[in-house]
């Protein structure tokens, strides 16, 4: 009888040990499975975060490029305006340089005409009506 009780007790201990090993194995697999799931979740979150950050960096870089291009364009427009004004002034000054001799020639021509008129007036008699007393 004692031998039978010891055998039953040993079988129960073996079953308990197997159950405990199975329980540990299941618990370990469950924990490992949860860890893998969490790792996948965290990996997805990290990738999403990285994409968001990368997108933001790219948009900020494009914004900086656009602002720089606009600034450069405004500088070019300002330089073009300054050059246009300078060239316009030069053009008008050159015109005045051409006008001065032209005005002198016109003045000389007018003086010659006046001299000719006075010479003609000296040569021709005055036909004006002199009966107004």
Image (cartoon, rainbow, N blue to C red):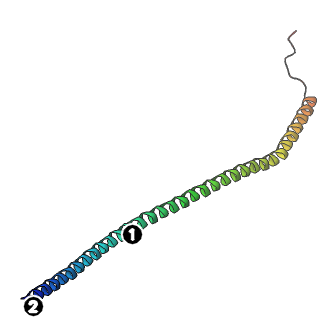
Q: CA distance from mark 1 to mark 2?
A: 64 Å
Q: Nearer the viewer, residue 72 or 125?
A: 72
Residue 76 x/y as whole percent: 64, 56
Residue plotted at (11% across, 89% down): 7
Residue plotted at (58% across, 58% down): 68
Mark 2 Cα shell of 10 Å, populated few (<14), some (14-19), many (≥20): few
Residue matched to label 2: 3
Q: Nearer the viewer, residue 25 or 56?
A: 25
Local SS, label 2: helix
Q: Nearer the viewer, residue 43 or 100?
A: 43
Residue 81 placement, left or right of 125: left
Q: In the figure, residue 67 lies in which quadrant?
A: bottom right
What residue occupies the far bottom of the structure in this picture?
A: 3
Residue plotted at (91% across, 26% down): 125
Local SS, label 1: helix
Residue 11 placement, left or right of 117: left
Residue 61 x/y as whole percent: 52, 62
């Amino acid at each position: 009888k004692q031998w039978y009780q010891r055998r039953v007790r040993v079988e129960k201990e073996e079953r308990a040990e197997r159950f405990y090993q199975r329980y540990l194995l299941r618990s370990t697999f469950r924990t490992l499975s949860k860890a893998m799931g969490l790792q996948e979740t965290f990996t997805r979150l990290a990738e999403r975060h990285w994409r968001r950050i990368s997108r933001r960096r790219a948009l900020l870089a494009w914004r900086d490029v656009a602002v720089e291009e606009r600034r450069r364009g405004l500088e070019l427009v300002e330089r073009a305006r300054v050059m246009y004004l300078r060239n316009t002034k030069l053009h008008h000054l050159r015109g005045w340089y051409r006008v001065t001799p032209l005005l002198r020639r016109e003045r000389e021509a007018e003086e010659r005409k006046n001299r000719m008129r006075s010479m003609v007036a000296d040569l021709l008699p005055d036909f004006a009506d002199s009966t107004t007393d």
